[in-house]
Amino acid sequence: MKFETLAIHAGRGPDSATGAVREPLHLSTTFERGADGAYPHGYDYTRSGNPNRTSLERAITALERGKDAIAFASGSAASLAVFALATPGGRIVCASDCYYGTGKQLRDIVPRWGIDVEFVDVSNLTEVSQALAVPTSLLWFETPSNPLLRVADIAALADLAHNRGTLVGVDNTFASPVLQQPLALGADVVMHSTTKYLGGHSDVLGGIVVTRDAGAECAALRQYQATAGGVPSPFDCWLLLRSLPTLPLRVRAQAANALAVARFLHADKRVEKVHYAGLPDHPGHEIALRQMSGGFGGVLSIEVPGGRDRAFAVAAKTQLFTRATSLGGVESLIEHRQSIEGPHSEAPAGLLRLSIGLEHVDDLIADLDQALDA
Ligand SMILES: *Cc1c(COP(=O)(O)O)cnc(C)c1O
């Protein structure tokens, strides 16, 4: 079935108890046992499973064309669940240009479990190959990356890693399954901060891991979900399910807006650099053309001359763009990344990250045009 159809129907259907066309919200934390001690509907306690969560997991499994999906209370809880698959003595190799919270987990939490962590430039296959020469449990990266919008070659990296017996995990938050499907390109697990495009309205926090196979990793993640307990609430799952039907429409329109904004900024002398894989002079453009379809995403970064002060002044002058962190919502946001990321930030001082929303693109361009006079 096609993506648009799955986005509306996968994991859902009229409620058999009431005929409700859209899914009821199941807030109950506990479920009745049969006289024989069994659980006739398959649910016992909401931390281990809940009908709204099951629907969400089935829907996103279908959208990423995976075998199963395991939902968490945030994207951070989801990435940590994958890192927790490594056992003491294990090793994780991660892209150096990654979401700063991911880097923080791999620097501050994971090494305490007796797991070695190395950061590499994943656009350099020789560097990755050298890093994987030491037995490695997991290779982790995101593409396009945050905040420099670098592109990693999913198929080439998966090949390299699989030749060494290394599991491949891709954070697909920026592209969403609308524009990029890493499992089909060889990734073993895909992770999302569903807070971003999947939620799409900046009103729900969540994360999910989708697995390509139903094997040992999948079972371990399912076990971890119930035991560690960082699960999403039924209402959060319900909100996410409500967002999915419009996901393809939203993401393609946001990507089209972002491309128009990127072209405008690229031609503007007041902007030093535009980081967006949809521009032909972006170093990852060819790879992005090959592995993405329908657009290059709704996020781009720009660098303005004059460093931090000038970047702050531009962000202060915008009227439509809201100065706030996060991305993927219907409203456009602008953010100075270095000042939020802290000491390990790879973001240049003059860098502003733009999350392009669904406003009319002419209004967005006019707003940036007047703000760049700051
Ligand atoms: C936001 C984000 C995360 C973390 O997700 P939370 O839901 O905020 O915990 C991870 N990766 C990427 C690429 C993100 O943008």
Image: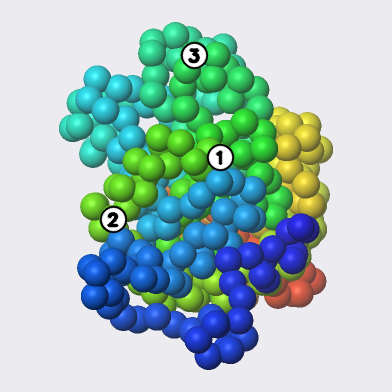
User: Quick check: can you spot residue 40?
Assistant: yes
Which element is circle 3 on? loop
- Label 1 vs label 2: CA separation? 20 Å
| Disc 1 element | loop
Q: Earlier in the sequence, mark 2 or mark 3?
A: 3
Q: Which residue is mark 3?
A: 164
Judge the density around disc 1: few (<14), some (14-19), many (≥20) Cα neighbours within 10 Å. many
| Secondary-structure class at tag 2 | helix
| Camera-nearest label, 1 or 3 | 1
Q: Is 89 left or right of 26, judged from the image as shown?
A: left
Give the image location of residue 19, x and y in percent: 58, 89
| Numbered disc in front, either 2 or 3 | 2
**Which quarter of the picture shows residue 245?**
bottom right
Q: Amino acid at mark 2?
A: Ala
The picture places residue 354, in percent across and down from the top left corner, at 60, 58
Q: For label 3, count other residues whose C-alpha is less than 10 Å away and answer few (under 14), some (14-19) or many (20+).
A: some
Going from N to C along the chain, the mark reached first, 1 or 3, is 3
Tell me the amino acid under the disc marked 1.
Answer: Arg
Label 2 crowding class (10 Å Cα cut-off): few <14, some 14-19, many 20+?
some
Asked if 76 appears above or below 155 in the picture, the reply is below
Q: Which residue is mark 2?
A: 226
Q: Nearer the viewer, residue 299 or 305?
A: 299
Mark 3 C-beta closer than 8 Å to ligand 1: no
Residue 7, percent from left and from top: 67, 66
- Identify residue for label 1: 212
Q: Is residue 22 or residue 236 the one in the foreground?
A: 22
